[in-house]
Image (spheres, coloured by chain):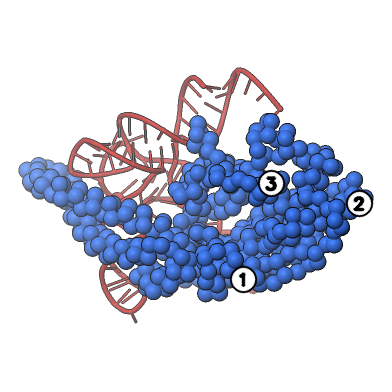
Amino acid sequence: MLTLQLFRQNKDLILDGLKKKNFKEPEIVEAIISLDEQRRHIQVQNDKIAAENNSAAKNIGILIGQGKKEEAEQIKAEVAGRKEESKEIANKLAALENEQMELLIKLPNLPHSSVPFGKTPEENETVRTGGVRPNLNAKKLPHWELTTQYNLIDFELGNKITGSGFPVYIGKGAKLQRSLISYFLDYNTAAGYGEVYPPFMVNEASAYGTGQLPDKEGQMYHATEDNFYLIPTAEVPVTNLYRDTITAEQDLPIKMTAYTPCFRREAGSYGKDVRGLNRLHQFDKVELVQFTHPDKSYEALEGMVEHVEKLLQSLGFEYRILRLCGGDMSFTSALTYDFEVYSAAQERWLEVSSVSNFESFQTNRCKIRYKNAEGKTQLAHSLNGSSLALPRIMACLLENFQTPEGIVVPEVLRSYFGNDMIN
RNA sequence: GGUGAGGUGGGUGAGUGGCCGAUACCAGUAGUUUGCUAAACUGCCGAACGGGUCAAACUGUUCCGCGGGUUCGAAUCCCGCCCUCACCGCCA
């Protein structure tokens, strides 16, 4: 959520930013500014009446204490006479505040100046590429055949016990998954990210805090009996750990990493994209979350990008890093880098990580703040990124490292996996 | 699931209709004292939204789990909801 101060200070900055994000209703900006003026005007009136009523009530108390009943009754009558009016103004104020909030939460975050213009994924900008594409022979298999051949994942069994998009990892498949999670967490904690293991369900307030509610309600699984939501990403519980808190400036940055499963309804996606491990309803992910000083968030973003890049390098994948264009960015992001890994058997790029700076967009809604040297409370900046999403890493690993003798396990995983081959 | 107790500022915890945005203690912070540390003492120390100001000073309103209600006046009384704790039952 954008801050109201920004509307008063720099309207054009907002309008330009919304344009870059291809936002369709820029007139909302004017509406918010006008509501802000009305609101402040009404608030002055409201405060004045409330102050009068407060002092009248106080006087009544004093008069009654002195036994001057008649005078007290007289003031009572005066206050009663104003009651209608005070109620009306208070209601008006509340209505304006609600209206303003409703408009405010419709506006996406503003893109950073380095974000390219564009509407579709084709207009994303490739920042850099790395790694080597494996040379597979003609008999290369897609991962959904490899998982069957080596008995690593049973998709049919998942269909039976739950439904499509809920694969069952078996034997070495399960162990490889666990190895990846452990490796990612160890890699992150070694870089100073504190490990947390949060709940996989959150309440309404948390879902609202990170922006899943009210707009993206349909994308989450909802346990209606208890009104809990299954988390679509660890970002939700981990960011909310600091909801409504004020930290000391010297405690920033706060760096956390968490492994969680992620649950997504993915309503409406079918077809080739969902084959095998490409798109699931439940998948594992190791996430990074940071809260930083506003002056340091872009530095932190570059640091996270480098961190994830080195992780991909350590696994031996060919990858590319994209800076998303305004139209392809998420609602809440100011700058996003997507990481894609080349899936050599499917012959396509798969997104395995997305690293974003949200600036104060999330922290404003979540009220994640710090106290600066002058003792003033300010919004921190928040960032997050995946390191990494497991299924597509698994898919690429199986496909890219397949040999006639079996699948070669990357060096860095061997101590976790306990073997250098799957065969 | 049953029964009971309770939700107050960063923490502990007082407050059952007006003098309460809230006693006290702890933590924090600034200072005094001090060879250093510690101790002691003194001051400051919640948030949001406004007015005001170049910026301050100053100042208004709101907030005692959340939402309603009663009243001139609510942390305090009434109703609904949420949550926490204890005990019992069940159980990984």
Quarter in which the N terminus of chain A is drawn: bottom left
The residue depicted at 39 percent of the width and 74 percent of the height is A12
Give whichever of A81, A358 is nearer the camera. Answer: A358
**Residue A334, image x, y percentages:** 53, 66
Residue hosting label 2: A404
In the rendered view, tell whether residue A230 sits above or below residue A30.
above
Q: Secondary structure at mark 3?
A: loop
The residue depicted at 25 percent of the width and 62 percent of the height is A38
Q: Residue furthest right?
A: A405
> Of callouts 2 and 1, which one flags the residue occurring earlier in the amino acid sequence?
1
**Residue A35, image x, y percentages:** 29, 61
Question: Is residue A107 toward the left or the right of residue A51 in the image?
Answer: right
Q: CA distance from mark 1 to mark 3?
A: 27 Å
Q: CA distance from mark 3 to mark 2?
A: 24 Å
Residue hosting label 3: A275
Amino acid marked by disc 3? Arg
Q: Residues within 10 Å of mark 3 (few under 14, many from 20)?
A: some
> Of callouts 1 and 3, which one flags the residue occurring earlier in the amino acid sequence?
1
Chain corresponding to red in the figure: B
Question: Is residue B5 toward the left or the right of residue A28 in the image?
Answer: right
Q: Colour of chain A?
A: blue
Q: Residue furthest front?
A: A138
**Residue A166, image x, y percentages:** 67, 39
Q: Secondary structure at mark 1?
A: strand
Foreground tag (2 vs 1): 2
Foreground tag (1 vs 3): 3
Give whichever of A122, A232 is nearer the camera. Answer: A122
